[in-house]
Image (spheres, grey):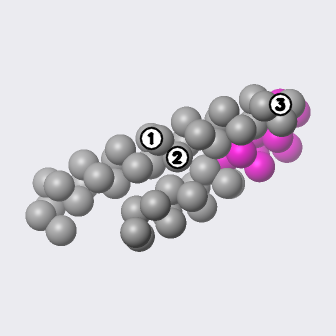
């Protein structure tokens, strides 16, 4: 659950920064989705290899 919460925060920030940089809303949503997927992948890998 903590992984999804952290990924949600990261994706929200990434989407907001993307929109502030001048991207349109659909592009910002895609950026946020990519950040979410990447964050979940990295955090799941860390949790797996540290036996958490």
Q: Which residues are magenta?
A: 14-23
Q: Residue at x 71, y 45 (%)?
A: 15
Asked if the residue under mark 1 is in contact with the one under mark 2, i.e. CB atoms within 8 Å, the reply is: yes
Q: Could you tell me which residue is drawn at 44 percent across and 48 percent down?
A: 39
Q: Which mark is residue 26?
A: none
Sequence order check, earlier mark of 3 and 1 = 3
- Residue in the image at 14% along x and 61% along y: 50
Label 2 and label 3: CA atoms lie apart by 18 Å
Relative to 20, 29 lies left or right: left
The residue singled out by tag 3 in the image is: 23
**Looking at the image, is 47 positioned above or below residue 38?**
below
Answer left or right for 50 relative to 14: left
How far apart are labels 3 and 1 at the CA level?
Answer: 20 Å
Pointer 1 residue: 38
The magenta stretch spans residue 17: yes
Residue 52 position in % (x across, y down): 18, 68
Q: How many numbered circles are shown?
A: 3
Q: Position of residue 46 (x, y in %)?
A: 24, 55
- What residue is disc 2 on? 36
């Amino acid at each position: 659950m903590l992984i999804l919460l952290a990924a949600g925060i990261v994706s929200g920030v990434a989407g907001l920064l993307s929109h502030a940089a001048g991207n349109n809303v659909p592009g910002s949503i895609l950026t946020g989705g990519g950040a979410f997927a990447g964050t979940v992948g990295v955090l799941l890998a860390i949790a797996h290899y540290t036996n958490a």
